[in-house]
Image (cartoon, rainbow, N blue to C red):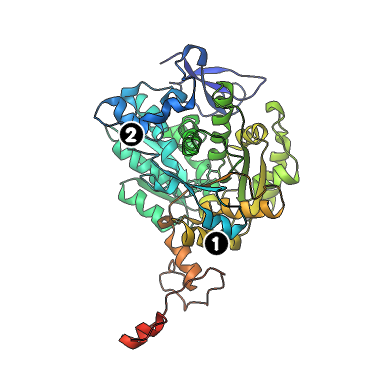
Amino acid sequence: MSDKAFQICINPDCRATFDIGQVIFACPKCQSMLDVGYDWDRLPVPHRMSFFEPRWCTKGHSVEARLDFSGVWRFRELLPFAPYDKIVTIGEGRTLLEENDRVGAQIGMKPKRLYLQYEGLNPSGSFKDNGMTAAITIASMLGRKRVACASTGNTSASMAVFANKSDPPMQGIVFIGSGKIAYGKLSQALDYGATTLQIEGDFDACLRRVRQIADKLGIYLMNSVNPFRLEGQKAIMYRVLQGLDWEVPDWIVVPGGNLGNSSSFGKAFIELHQLGLIDRVPRLAVINAAGANTLYHLYEKESLRWQGGRFDAAKIGGLYAAMDESHYLPHTVASAIEIARPVNLPKVLRALDFMNGVVREVTDEEILEHKAIVGHYGFGCEPASAASVAGLRRLLAEQVISPDERVVCILTGHELKDPDATVKYHTGLDMKLAVPPPATPPTGVMANPPKKVPDDLDAIAAALGERI
Ligand code: F0G
């Protein structure tokens, strides 16, 4: 395969390189994580970001026109690992950056300062499609017939649809934890025909198992330890810049689960800076759920830092040992980010270092309230996504972010991914149970339950505050 793209160990004391055709998810020499690296000097890189501008509107049926239609491959010179005619795309990444003053006003931002990046508008309804198009492309280049992932739901939905749409189609194999997946996401994996294995255990257990199974049975692993996934997710940042007329914002705020997204944002800005395509770098805020706050704990409480790649791995080992001993299981209403052992921990430390980042945790109550705010004043999002807006409000209260800074919150998944959480918030009714118990009155400040009205014209008018 191309010698201008390769896999490279992130450990500064190793930096071993490997062909992109080698199926490895950790460095065989030192077990550190791998990046996709490029020999930029031998590649045609544009001199300014506005080079990509006209592609948004390209029409036609050529290979290039098809790639221009994708919000990921529109930026193909910035992830140049695949021949263009081998790329598997389903029109991912045509998402929206919205300036939203109404949400901004609710949380204390000045006008024209808050932007919401709606990744729920992807074909499978979450940001995962950005990375999946890249990972399925390499799987297809390698001639793989089966792909697998562990998932809290969105990765599996995305992988399942891409596996179906590759030519020839691949078998998608999904590992999900018991009782932890939102129905919107489960329904997608089932409908797209993925073989779905429900493992007794949580996401971390599923990920451990799928890595073993993929290794032993020669199935291609699609979780974000696969460095090609992160290549595609860099494009979310390119689109944010495009939405801002190529101006760099002050802050990017993103929920953190397995930490693939935040890691890929760091890599995007490291490379754009290295290539001279941007002159400043935004700050990064990664927001954990309080019930799954490994990164927050390690970064903010134990001051774990990247240290040029020589981070203190003993701190991570110590925390994980303590979790094992106390049989700790993460728990949050934001099931997408209910993860205790995030695999991209080293890479997110690098991202936080380069982007002068901070990490915060938010409670389930804050997540649900801010989800309802985004629903009321925006296009809606799933619970995990709202952690970004809730986290921003905390950072405003702490005066880490000022209300007149330009802030982009990433809304990672579509509102309809988890309708149960929404209905429960507004009505108090738990639809997930086969025989729902009577509703308990909703307590959220944004709660907006349906009104029970008799089948009577006057009563209906009265419920609308009118008289006939
Ligand atoms: N938001 C949503 C909606 C997600 O589905 C996820 C991760 C995240 C945020 C966190 O992103 O892992 O890159 O830090 N979902 C994975 C899944 C774990 O299996 O769908 P991250």
Is 162 left, or right, of 302 in this rendering? Answer: left
Secondary structure at badge 2 equals helix
Please, what is the three-letter code of the amino acid marked with disc 1?
A: Leu
Instruction: Find out if the beta carbon at label 1 lies less than 8 Å from the nearest ligand 1 atom.
Output: no
Pointer 1: residues within 10 angstroms few (<14), some, or many (20+)?
Answer: many
Tell me the distance, in whole angstroms, between the alpha carbons under discs 1 and 2: 37 Å
Residue 297 position in % (x across, y down): 70, 47
Q: Which residue lies most toward the front here? A: 111
Residue 57 vertical position relative to residue 174 in the rendered view, above or below: above
Q: Nearer the viewer, residue 272 or 15?
A: 272
Marker disc for residue 231: none
How crowded is the residue under tag 2: few (<14 C-alpha within 10 Å), some, or many (20+)? few
Q: Using residue 273 as the reference point, say whether residue 454 is left or right of it.
A: left
Residue depicted at 46% across the width and 70% down the height: 430
In front: label 1 or label 2: 2
Locate residue 425, reporting x and y percent.
50, 68
- Total numbered badges shown on the rendered structure: 2
Q: Which mark is residue 57?
A: 2
SS class of the residue under badge 1? helix
Residue at 46% x, 34% y is: 235
Q: Nearer the viewer, residue 33 or 238?
A: 238
- Which residue, given by chain and number where applicable, does mark 1 sit on? 368
Q: Is residue 381 visible?
A: yes
| Picture coordinates of residue 48, whole percent (x, y) | 49, 23
Q: Nearer the viewer, residue 443 or 180?
A: 443
Assign the N terminus to one quadrant of the image: top left
Q: Amino acid at mark 2?
A: Cys
Q: Is mark 2 within 8 Å of ligand 1?
A: no
**Could you say where residue 437 lies in the image, as x and y percent from the top left?**
46, 76
Circles 1 and 2 in contact, beta carbons < 8 Å: no
